Image (spheres, coloured by chain):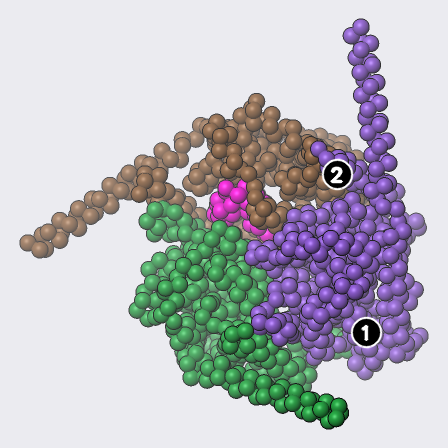
Chain colours: A brown, B purple, C green
Amino acid sequence: MTDAATNMRLKLPLICIILEVILIILFGTLVQYNYETDARLWHEHKTNHSDYDNDFYYRYPSFQDVHVMIFIGFGFLMTFLQRYGFSSVGFNFLIAAFALQWATLMQGFFHGMHHGKIHIGVESMINADFCTGSVLISFGAVLGKTSPVQLLVMALFEVTLFAVNEFILLSALGARDAGGSMTIHTFGAYFGLVVARVLYRPNLDKSKHRNSSVYHSDLFAMIGTIYLWMFWPSFNSAITAHGDDQHRTAMNTYYSLAACTLSTYALSALTAHDGKLDMVHIQNAALAGGVAAGTAGEMMLTPFGSMIVGFLAGIISVLGFKYLSPILEEKLKIQDTCGVHNLHGMPGILGAIVGAVTAALATRDVYGDGLEDVFPDVAKGEIEASFQGVRQAISLAVTLGIALLGGLIVGKYTPDPRDVFDKWEERFCRAIKESKMTINNIYTKLES
Amino acid sequence: MTDAATNMRLKLPLICIILEVILIILFGTLVQYNYETDARLWHEHKTNHSDYDNDFYYRYPSFQDVHVMIFIGFGFLMTFLQRYGFSSVGFNFLIAAFALQWATLMQGFFHGMHHGKIHIGVESMINADFCTGSVLISFGAVLGKTSPVQLLVMALFEVTLFAVNEFILLSALGARDAGGSMTIHTFGAYFGLVVARVLYRPNLDKSKHRNSSVYHSDLFAMIGTIYLWMFWPSFNSAITAHGDDQHRTAMNTYYSLAACTLSTYALSALTAHDGKLDMVHIQNAALAGGVAAGTAGEMMLTPFGSMIVGFLAGIISVLGFKYLSPILEEKLKIQDTCGVHNLHGMPGILGAIVGAVTAALATRDVYGDGLEDVFPDVAKGEIEASFQGVRQAISLAVTLGIALLGGLIVGKYTPDPRDVFDKWEERFCRAIKESKMTINNIYTKLES
Amino acid sequence: MTDAATNMRLKLPLICIILEVILIILFGTLVQYNYETDARLWHEHKTNHSDYDNDFYYRYPSFQDVHVMIFIGFGFLMTFLQRYGFSSVGFNFLIAAFALQWATLMQGFFHGMHHGKIHIGVESMINADFCTGSVLISFGAVLGKTSPVQLLVMALFEVTLFAVNEFILLSALGARDAGGSMTIHTFGAYFGLVVARVLYRPNLDKSKHRNSSVYHSDLFAMIGTIYLWMFWPSFNSAITAHGDDQHRTAMNTYYSLAACTLSTYALSALTAHDGKLDMVHIQNAALAGGVAAGTAGEMMLTPFGSMIVGFLAGIISVLGFKYLSPILEEKLKIQDTCGVHNLHGMPGILGAIVGAVTAALATRDVYGDGLEDVFPDVAKGEIEASFQGVRQAISLAVTLGIALLGGLIVGKYTPDPRDVFDKWEERFCRAIKESKMTINNIYTKLES
């Protein structure tokens, strides 16, 4: 048994058990059912509502679609790297299962506290899955460079920063970002890219053949892609207001993705020197339309506007894969393993800008009384629509700042998890050795 | 770089960009949110309805199931041909993304115009996916014989004819076809078969080993099959009336498929000379029960009737694969790559006949006030149930006529898309050359 | 053509056709639409309800998730055995399609009869899928030891016993088991294990390499695992009461599974001698949290309690794979091909115990008026909560008794299906021979 194997043998179990025990204790002390999941509370209000008013029926189908995107979508999308087929699916599973529990606590802490307790239900489950998605985007940037232990530590800090950033954007700044162009995609991508920069391994170039994809890997990856593509309308609409808002958001996203697919195929064939479609472009860039419709999807963007946004997102994304990624790797030493900058980074920024512009152009003529749902502060007359646009723009800047700084700190200045765990492990091994000696002593005494 | 590669390099991008730009312009001028997706309109009617009345909550889960059938179901079903694994998934994706946008316009033009505008929402999204399904059925018949450019041109015309046929059936003739036995399956299959006949390539026989399936291809194809099988109840019930109609349609389809699966296994083992099950039968014929329940599924067919229909559909489909497909290829020179005649063609006709008979037998005793939902003209006393049966039968004949004639014209008399694009390309290359010369001239002048 | 092939050629078709014809006749005489699927009945009550009150909208999304678990989840989970890739998916499909029809009849017979008729709708469809799940669990224990004909015969008897056991538990004993820790998982696992014991083949040891998994098999199996994992919240909540009950059950299961995943990874790495994660553990044990939350999921278990349950389930399951399965095989001669004892058996018993304890601790303080939904007899004051706990414990004992005894009888004392069918086949062949002779005689007479 090598040293690395010994490490793995104890470190991963230790961190998993410690984290889960902490989670269970915190859930026991802090978390409660909200009034829609609590038997007593729900039935107390029973005279005022029917069972249908339970948010479960409004959001659970969307939740399940989001859940599929997180576990099948992200998990299989990354299998296109034959070398990391297992790592991507298996580690994706582990990190996601941890992150969604931790996110429940962190997000609840920032915007779900009631008398010192976190109240949870289907909406908090969706938000936890969203936060997990952001962590998985970062994972895509560092795939192949990190151990599962490091990934869990990264998830621990990233989820925390995600909740801070989300709080600043949605609560402090009053920005709108239902589908998370900023909070999920921009944040996850730039956070991951900085971590990837810190973990730069020059030797990875030499083992580049490991990054090559093969026939079956590509078909597995297409499963991931197509699930993400199909369910993105549910993702963007999962936590928008009931009624026309969910309906409109899903439809805007649907058309954005369709337009994006055509521009992706066009640009992929155009930029290839032999006219062949590049599977990596199709697996990734065709999804950029969903990312770019994340902020403005709930607004009156119109299918027309959505298609323009999707069309541009596809173009930007393919060009990024073709021309920008090699520059990032050579000049900035950022090895973006899965190209998250092209799928989540740039399209996320595009989505944020589109959101800011669409918000600034909002009028009561167009939204009617629906203005209350989308821009409550504008509807109340507290601010002008143009100022809502400014809020959105500031939110993008804040997100970029926190992601870049956070990634830098988590990647660099945090003590290497190995050191921490080596100490733990040393103590653990010593404890085992001592207890064995004690037992031996007892046996010796008993025998004598 | 060969000529073919050059062609591919420019043709595919050109057609994708041209089509998408046309789509965007048409959406900009013609398409509007309907009252359930428009913020102002929905909130204007807010006093009369609650958020739950928004059609989104009745239909969006079904829409997502249909979406999975179109992109995962059809896409992966065709991967059983090892040779065409990528083409089937990748081209399926491209064609579907185009077809659903074009279908929104064509179907809106024929039955969604309000004051010169097309109003869209979740129901139009389902209908667009349905129309896309029809195009993908035709794609199954010509898989391996066409370039993506030809497929896009085929989709352009097929979607248009689909909308015409659908308009004639549902609006002009007053037929019922919620699950599309006629409009989707029969139309798509016979249209595709005629195109396949026109594109007959005798050499395809010699490369028949390319059509052979291998272990992993078959497992991928089973993913496609099982998704289609599981979600077919959602497909047939997606646009039926709210309440008992959606409920009943889903249940009828569920039992039809279950019965079909048993007859498929029975017939597959019975017709094999060594008793082994043929994976191609199982991957396809087990689905025929869904196709055959497409028209009558919303009617009071009873689970008993549904199971008889499914049982027969499985038998017909396996026998078709075993005995009819070789005849079609040898005598009629129709190389039906994926066997769409056996899965969609014959079971579609069976479904149309079952629909006509079930309609003719409808009585107020059985349907009560629910007659209004299923056969409005009969409920109003305008026609007899038996005449509704005649309408259904005429609709089948019309569908076959338009599909066969349309396929012939699109396949044969349309100018070969290659010619059209070669001219475009020539101009395009000349334009590039000229602009390069101009730039060179400018540089030369500047330098001198 | 070998004898075995001949047998297969006739036996499988014969049993499929006979069973399906019997099913169709029984459906024709016994089964009717319930009032939510019947056009007349639904519209008669139309004044008292809106379309939304139709149970379809409360349960159909959950039904589809359960459907995916049965056909994709169970089907692909078992593909991890490279040797049995096709068998697992293909036979899974056949058995499930049969079992869900037979279960509709058996379950309807025991708790859905109205004036001699079985009334069906979406809830009976979910129950039929649940019963099918139990059969597929047993299938996992005997995978590779049985022909499809034997599997169909096993399904025939197991479904019947399942319905008897379910009737005793839910109707006679008044136990609660919405997610089926007892009725589905414990029953299916122990039934299958006894059948596996009876079918013990010592030679299977020698061909153990056939049980080894390979790269792509493992990725296919992960598709099965992750679908089961994602949709387990829908499984456990599919038939609980509307409103807070469905909502709470889904959430409890979600957190149980998340905690289970972390303990599974921890234990898998800890028990491996080289620290590597064992894919079989991850593919199976990570799901034990769903099984263990099957009974108590609908109760006020709290997320905290759910996480403890899931955490323990993961530990028990991995330890079972590592230490108990080899003992079962060596000492008890039970070759549990897919390890169903570790995924469904022990976690099912854990779930039953957790359910009994949680029921015994129920108070009106905690449940309020919601007590009526979860423990109606306690709410009415007919019994104490502690007695409900006793009922739950007795139910576990009954389930184990019926499963073990039933498995023994079905496995051993039932005449070997081969004998039965050999006689049938003999007669069939003789009949064919005689009819051929008759035809020959006629021809001879005609020619002469």
What percent of the width, then of the height, locates residue A387? Answer: 73, 31
Going 41% across and 52% down the picture, which residue do you hit?
A: C278
Q: Which residues are magenta?
A: A67-95
For the residue pair A76 and C150, the one nearer the viewer reads as: C150
Query: Mark on residue B353?
Result: 1
Residue extending farthest left? A448
The disc labelled 2 sits on which kind of residue?
A: Ala
Is A68 magenta? The answer is: yes
Going 64% across and 63% down the picture, which residue do you hit?
A: B280
Image height of C137 relative to A200, above or below: below
Residue extending farthest front? C448
Q: Are marks 2 and 1 on the same chain?
A: yes
Q: Chain of mark 2?
A: B
Q: Label 2: state its secondary structure.
A: helix
Q: Is A63 displayed left or right of C403 in the figure?
A: right
Q: Chain of mark 1?
A: B
What residue would you read off at disc 2? B4
What percent of the width, then of the height, locates residue C237? Answer: 56, 64
For the residue pair C75 and C403, the one nearer the viewer reads as: C75
> Taking the image as drawn, is residue C73 in sight?
yes
The disc labelled 1 sits on which kind of residue?
A: Ile
Q: Is A368 displayed left or right of A322 in the figure?
A: right
Going 62% across and 86% down the picture, which residue do you hit?
A: C432
Query: Mark on residue A435?
Result: none
Mark 1, Cα crowd under 10 Å, few <14 / some 14-19 / many 20+, is many
Quarter holding residue C103: bottom right
First reached walking from the N terminus: tag 2 or tag 1: 2
Q: Label 1: state its secondary structure.
A: helix
Q: What is the tally of numbered marks visible in this picture?
A: 2
